[in-house]
Image (tube, rainbow, N blue to C red):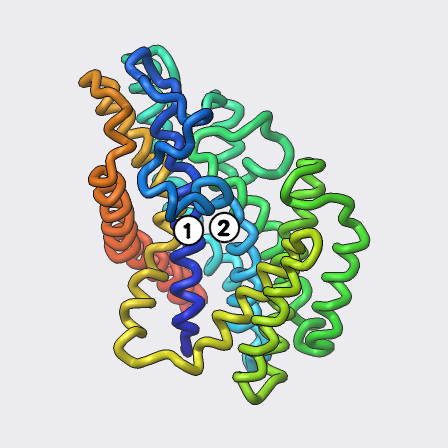
Amino acid sequence: MRKFYYIELLRFFTALSVVLFHYEHFFGPYSSFSTINIIDNKFMQPFYTFLEIFYNHGNYGVPMFWAISGFVFAFVYLDKKKEIKGKKFFINRFSRLYPLHFATLMIVTLLQIINYKSLGNFQIYQLNDIYHFFLNLFFISGWGFEKSYSFNGPIWSVSVELIFYMLFFISIIYLNKYKIKYALLIYLLLLIVDKTEIDGGDASVMALFVDCGKLFFSGILVFFIYEKVNKKLYLLLLSVILILFSFVGNFKIFLFFPSVLLLFVALEIFIHEKFKKIFEFFGNTTYAMYLLHIPVQILIITIFGHFNIFNDIFISGYFFVFYIMLMTTLSFLCFKFYEKPLFLKIRSFYSKSNLSK
């Protein structure tokens, strides 16, 4: 299947932005040897001058993820000659998402138990009780039943997105028939429902669902625009104009992210053969980087806490480079030796069980 290599690169930078946004977790008040209050001294974080936008706004990687997902789903599943069966669709999603989610949930649970017994407190996210464990276990930690973030916190955004995986599957027949008209209809309906922005305002569950839906379907709209415009240079020009327009007046977040997505799709015409494997490498680390960075942070904090190592080490540029290299390496190894073999095995088992019927 054809790949969009610049989208792979965008996925990596999107995950990395969330990792950088959460870098401040290293300075949390996890013990008496926490010497730096980073909330009041954000500028002390490594390479702050260059990375300020990520330290302060890296959480915007989440809405970018949602838009990318819409595009990728449209590319993979729409206009296919073979009928897409529900069971196969959901097995594919389950095999790709759940194994790593389950593994990181178990790792975080173990680490938090160790922390509580040795240091007397949890690290980063505090609501690590049985109730929130089961919300995480059943992949519904972002559905409004939770009191706050818990265990491996970032998984909330994936749990919200699951709703739109289901809506997408239900909509496939209509998206194939009415194409951009149907996607635009859903998008406009979500705009009507929406009364908030992601940035500030009401952070209710309904607002999050609506925000996710708008961005997911904006990604589908980008796919249809990509298919409709033959001269891809026009897409490049259009994306730049839309990005610039999103900064006119108030920042138009729901225009900015699909416009950036359109830009990276349009850049595909410039892809050089030698960059394809590099971009694919980085793209493959994305999901693992998103789910592993909290367990890795908790592990580092736990080890440093045990040996009474002061947290001012985290402002070191050397530690920062080590941490980013560690996250990238671990994420790739996780994909190669855990994620990929497991989702291939699950899908193979499903295919064989279907053939035997």
Q: Residue furthest bottom?
A: 230
Where's the N terminus, which quadrant?
bottom left
| Residue 27 drawn at (x, y percent) | 36, 26
In the depicted structure, whether residue 77 falls above or below residue 120? below
| Between discs 2 and 1, the one toward the N terminus | 1
**Residue 84 visible, this angle:** no
Q: Are marks 2 and 1 in contact (CB under 8 Å)?
A: yes
Q: Quadrant of residue 122?
A: top left
Q: Is residue 306 left or right of residue 36?
A: left
Q: Residue at x 61, y 65 (%)?
A: 244
| Residue 314 drawn at (x, y percent) | 28, 31
Q: Quick one: 114 or 60, which is closer to the camera?
A: 60
Residue at the spot of label 2: 61
Hey, what amino acid is under mark 1?
Ala
In the depicted structure, whether residue 63 falls above or below residue 184? above
Hey, what amino acid is under mark 2?
Gly
Q: Is residue 58 left or right of residue 163?
A: left
Q: Residue furthest front?
A: 49
**Residue 316 visible, this angle:** yes
Residue at the spot of label 1: 15
- Using a 10 Å C-alpha cutoff, classify the residue at mark 2 as few (fewer than 14 neighbours), some (14 to 19) or many (20 or more): many
| Residue 343 drawn at (x, y percent) | 36, 57
Q: Quadrant of residue 83?
A: bottom right
Secondary structure beneath label 2: helix
Residue 84 numbered tag = none
| Residue 13 drawn at (x, y percent) | 40, 56
